[in-house]
Image: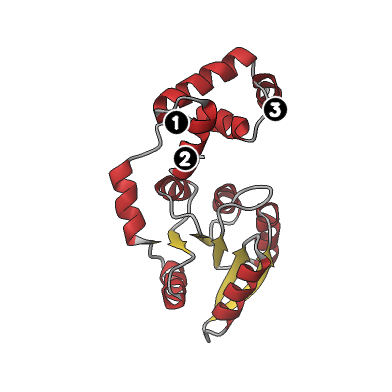
Amino acid sequence: MIRILLADDQALVRGALSAMLNLESDIEVVAEVGSGDEVLDAALRTTPDVALLDVQMPGKDGLVAAAELRERLPSCKVIVCTTFGRPGYLSRAMAAGAVGFVVKDSPPEQLVDAVRRVDSGLRVVDPALAAESLASGPSPLTEREREVLAAASVGGTIADVAKQLHLSQGTVRNHLSAAIGKTGARTRAEAARLAEDRGWL
């Protein structure tokens, strides 16, 4: 029996995925959570074989949760299952330790097959997204530039971002300037939007 942990902030989607997976004779959903903050505790409590994680969730996102699972419960294999098939998400998911990446509009049988293949030790990646990711290349942003741009994308002043990230205002300006240049944007808002669209944030 393949034991599954589901993490998705949309209750309807989570419930539908759970019902679909539980129809399979060799799959059992042992935990369902609605935020990234709940993933590790639920996994340590139920020891799933596979965790199916959404990317965008309240609290920690699915990529942070995947990295935590790799460190604390390496026996649990992670599949990222998201609405947002962005190349940057794929590369970040793999860097976080995910061994599968599927988009939510995949046919149900494809998701079930991905669960079985990942459980057997294989890596499963949506082929169209893999090709797009190779074509677009890696994110040009450093981790600090990504962090500063993400903080700036929700609004607030340079001073607000500096306080939130415990940086000087000059350092924040430098990182934002670098991020704007690397994305080819004219403003920090445009840089954040472009980076978000490419899955770099």
**Please, what secondary structure does the residue beneath circle 1 have?**
loop
Q: Are marks 2 and 3 in contact (CB under 8 Å)?
A: no
Amino acid type of the residue tagged 3 in the rendering: Gln
Question: On the image, numbered disc 2 is attached to which residue?
Answer: 200
State the count of labels. Answer: 3
Residue 197, given in percent of the width and then of the height, sits at 46, 44
Q: Which residue is mark 3?
A: 164
Tell me if label 1 and label 2 are in contact, CB under 8 Å. yes
First in residue order: circle 3 vs circle 1: 1
Give the camera-side residue of 71 and 159: 159
Q: Residue at x 59, y 34 (%)?
A: 153
How far apart marks 3 and 1 lie (CA) works out to 20 Å
* Residue 195 versus residue 117 in the image, above or below: above
The percent position of residue 88, horizontal first and vertical second, equals 43, 45
- Give the CA distance from mark 2 to mark 3: 20 Å
Kind of residue indicated by mark 2: Trp
Front-most of 189 and 23?
Answer: 189
Type of colouring:
secondary structure
Q: Residue at left 64%, top 20%?
A: 158
Q: Quadrant of the N terminus?
A: bottom right
Q: Amino acid at mark 1?
A: Leu
Nearer the N terminus, badge 2 or badge 3?
3
- Does dot 3 land on a helix, a strand or a loop? helix
Mark 1 nearby-residue class (10 Å; few <14, some 14–19, many ≥20): some
Q: Earlier in the sequence, mark 1 or mark 2?
A: 1
Q: Is residue 80 or residue 71 the one in the foreground?
A: 80
Image quadrant assignment for residue 54: bottom right
Residue 141 circle label: 1
